[in-house]
Amino acid sequence: MYALMALGITLTVSVIKLPNFAHAEYITVGAYAALIASQQFPGNPLLIIVIAGTAGALAALIAHLTVFRALEKQRSSTYTLLLASFAVGLILRYSLFILADSTNLFDRRIQVSLQVLLREGSLIITNIFAWVVPTSLILVMLLSLLLNHTPIGRDMRAMANNLDLARIIGVRVERVKNWTWMLVGLLAGSSGALWGIYSSVSPLMGWFAILSVFAAAILGGMSSFTGTILGAYLVAFSENTVMQFLNFQLGVDFSFKPAVPFIIIILILLFRPQGLTGLFDFLRRGELRR
Amino acid sequence: MNIDAGATLTALLTLFGIYGLIALSLNLEYGVAGIPNFGKALFVSIGAYTTGVTYTRLLPLLAGQEAVSPCGMTLSTALQLRTAIMRDLPGIGFVNFAVTIAIAMGVGAVVGCLMSYAALRLRQEWFLALVLLVGSEIVRIFVRGYEPIICASNGVSGIAQPFFFIRDARLNSIMFMLLILIMLLVVYVYVERLVRSPYGRLLRAVRENAEVAQAMGKNVAQIRAGVMAIGSAIAAAAGVLFALNVGFVSTNDYDVALTLDIWVMVVLGGLGNPRGALLGALLITLLDRFTGIAAIQLNRTGIALEFNYFRYILLGVILLLMLRFRPRGLLPERRHATLAYQALESQAAESTGDRG
Amino acid sequence: MKRFLRALLIAVFVLAFSNLAVAQDDLEIITLGVAQPFTGPLGSFGQDFTRGIQLAVMQMNAQLEAAGSKIRFEAVSQDTEGTPEGAARAVRTIVQTTNAQVIVGPLTTSEVLGAKQFVDENGIVIVAPASSGVAGGIPGDNIFRVMYPPDVYAANAFAQIAIARGYQNVVVLHVNDPFGNGLAEKFTTEFQAAGGGDVTVVSYAPNPIDLSAEATRVSAEVARLQGSGSTAFFCVCFLADAQKLLQIALVDPTLSAVEWMGIENLANPQLLEDAAIADFLRAANFISVSFADNSTPLTQPFIDSFTAEFGSAPGPFTNYAFDAANIAMLTILVAGNDGLAVKSMLPFISSHYIGTAVQAYLDENGDQAVVYYGLFQVSPDAPEFVAVGSYDGATRVVTFNQ
């Protein structure tokens, strides 16, 4: 799940060149759309995920058209955009609070009952796992197909590489940006839905996770998909396994757990800003920036 | 409807003073020197945590009494002890206050310096923003989980301001407000002079183009470290005042939301202009107070509990509009012309005049 | 832009100072302050609490009108943002804007402590209906924590339940905040004082993204302690966190084999909407405590009138807010709208008030001292919680129904 959320960040940072903190809210928007959809159409996870993805995509597109496009036009600095993304997040977050308040939807879980499909020793496959993992994989695969084998994907890669050059060779930058934002929102929204099935939905869910998601994207080097996916799994792994190790062996309290992804961010940015990319040659295949 | 105008004004100016100090420090760091300090809450919290430590450990020692652990079973004994000292021994209260401010500024400056060296290693400009943001969260999580500092997540209460010995609550809060405003004035004059000085020009040069400054033989790393140290010391001092104003130190107060509030103030007021920072702090404090009072008026009529959410939405909208239509703030940076530059300008004017 | 800002500020200013209340000259309107978190992680509580207080005010005003009194109450609320500093600001704003002398709220112990300095100095009284943290038990201050008992009692109740059920060891998972820390610590001492064996405490940071590492640790601790006798698991966690934990526990062989206890928040029917979780909790012999088991004549009337007024059933803890508002108003009626008089009168009044769950009676810290919990388990036939016994705080004894 981190993978899906972090992929969106990687895509924004590399194509749009914007560290977007409102990404958190696209996730939450998706989760709420899924929650409401699940009450209308119970027992249809696929439809729920599609609706969530659409809601996320819409939120991202609207935010781009109303806010970010104008700011980019006046050549604002990255910090200005960063700040604007915080503002967009603030607006979306509290709009969701109003929604949650009027419909009494705080801390609800999207009701998909957990069933164990397969139990082999320590390997346990549940129906939720069976939904979440393939959905993530399919989305990631679709994404890489889109990027590597379609004209729009080619344009995105061109923009990631060199925006001015892309403009000169006739890439329709605005159209590609719109598509990128929708894609980003789709990823965020559907990951929100998957997350809501796994735990529970609240207006602050995205906000609490966003820094961990950034950690995953940064670990992945912010430019490569394979790297990002790997980064996401590493962050999830280290959050739990490293913390577990520290706890069992050294007695470090779990209260410190949220600090783990943050420490990863700092260490990576300080000592290996390119992330995981370039560590192994085969990782280069999925790269946006060649 | 009976608004206590005097008390409202006192509270407003107290908050303005504290936020004004923090906004001034950010304005110096980002507005003038171009360092995106998204870890403002960290430096403010340093001041607050220092306060928590000195008021529970140092204060009893200064008063010649044995310090009692402020956490756990002895919580209320320790609380009564420090309240009694602040009530009855004003001199010791002031000494403790001064020592706290000094320690907080020292620690703030050192941490600020250290953080600025992180900047050297960073590849992309917004990485620094992220490192500072994340650094402030790490410290918060650490203090929240580590008991010896401020009793972990329990916090420390009964942190009284130095004028607490005056029994009249109205009078002592006015005295505290005056103290804060005097500190604000001193810092403002200092920052204003700093911005106009050659050092200020140097800072702007580093902001505009670090490579050129480097090529001119300036030590960019040292300059950045210096300005971070100054800014962080100011923020830590403000943190002490922040904690004293609430009377309680808790990690819950120093999260990303505080940093964002300060950023909104600085962007709203004007980057690179100390007066802008003060204006921004004033406007946002006013907005906070008035929306608060307006909320009370509205829910008297039994409607609009959602107004609380609109406050945040409003803050977001204001920030976006500012970024869009007035990216340099309400009071933009003034051009600081040196004598030599003025001479050049007048020469240029004369020569064009000759030709005309 | 400048014009827009100016217009905005003026609009807010006018709103702030215009008098929207329809004041009738011959009536004396007394303001009851309400400070609650409407935003932040606890935002979901604020709305319901405020409604509970509004209901109390409406009922009181109707009675006053019928009796021909000239006194009316109004409730005005302010957002604490869930932070201590926000609480301090909220209380200050209410007092300075409306001259309210009594504030109902805030929710958590750290918010209460944030507002403490201001109220102590200015002679304002806080009546907090849900703060229970051990850190807030301070004698002689202006803070009264009515209705919801301090965690000392919950800790004792769970310790007694654990002993009655024959647990030798307990593994506690608790949220790392003043509430969770205090409860876990007290539970340990109470359980061991009552003859229990080992207690292992695992804490987690507030608002976790997931709890799988914590769950692994708990599971390992349970497995370890089971070597020396029967072991139970005690969840001191919020509802959303419990949802996350349960998803992991469903497939964890150790956690699904052990018996569960959980704090009051978890006796929430929302948890049982998912059939798998209902089955799990039933199998885990899950037990929780609650006040909401019709223990006074006021309980059902409160639920009925709340539902009639607002169209939905009151959320958890809402009845305590209702009671706190009533105690505050009764005290004001007797002592006048003066903080210091209210402070000295409030313990007397509250000891003569029948609450919606239990009678209010305060100890020397100004904290609730009459405690009566209902014990709840998942019904064997349906996904709902049913009462299985009770706990009396005076005798500190649990009794199970047959």
Image: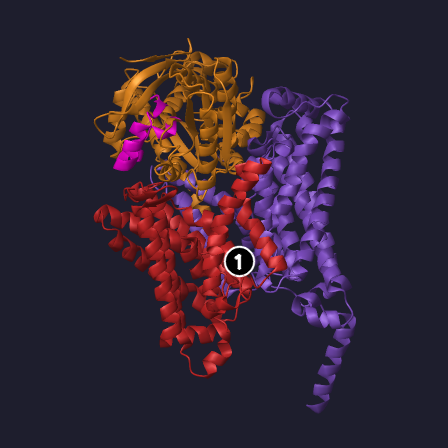
Chain colours: A red, B purple, C orange
Percent position (x, y) of residue A110?
30, 45
Q: Residue furthest top?
A: C395
Residue B247 versus residue C230 in the image, above or below: below
Which residue is rendered at x = 45% and y = 84% of the image?
A: A169
Left/right placement of residue A257 relative to residue A38 reads right
User: Where is mark 1, residue-wise?
Assistant: A219
- Magenta stretch in the rendered image: C263-291
Q: Which one is nearer the viewer's eye here, C153 or B19?
A: C153
Amino acid beneath label 1: Leu
Left/right placement of residue A28 relative to residue B290 reads left
Residue C330 versus residue B312 in the image, above or below: above
> Callout 1: few (<14), some (14-19), or many (20+) C-alpha neighbours within 10 Å?
many
Q: Chain of mark 1?
A: A
Residue B35 shows in the view: yes
Is A204 magenta? The answer is: no
Q: Which one is nearer the viewer's eye here, A216 or A56?
A: A216
- Tell me which corner region of the image, top left, top right, bottom left or bottom right, holds residue B327: bottom right
Residue C354 shows in the view: no
Which residue is rendered at x = 48% and y = 30% of the image?
A: C221
SS at badge 1: helix
Percent position (x, y) of residue A71?
48, 67
Left/right placement of residue C226 relative to residue B161 reads left
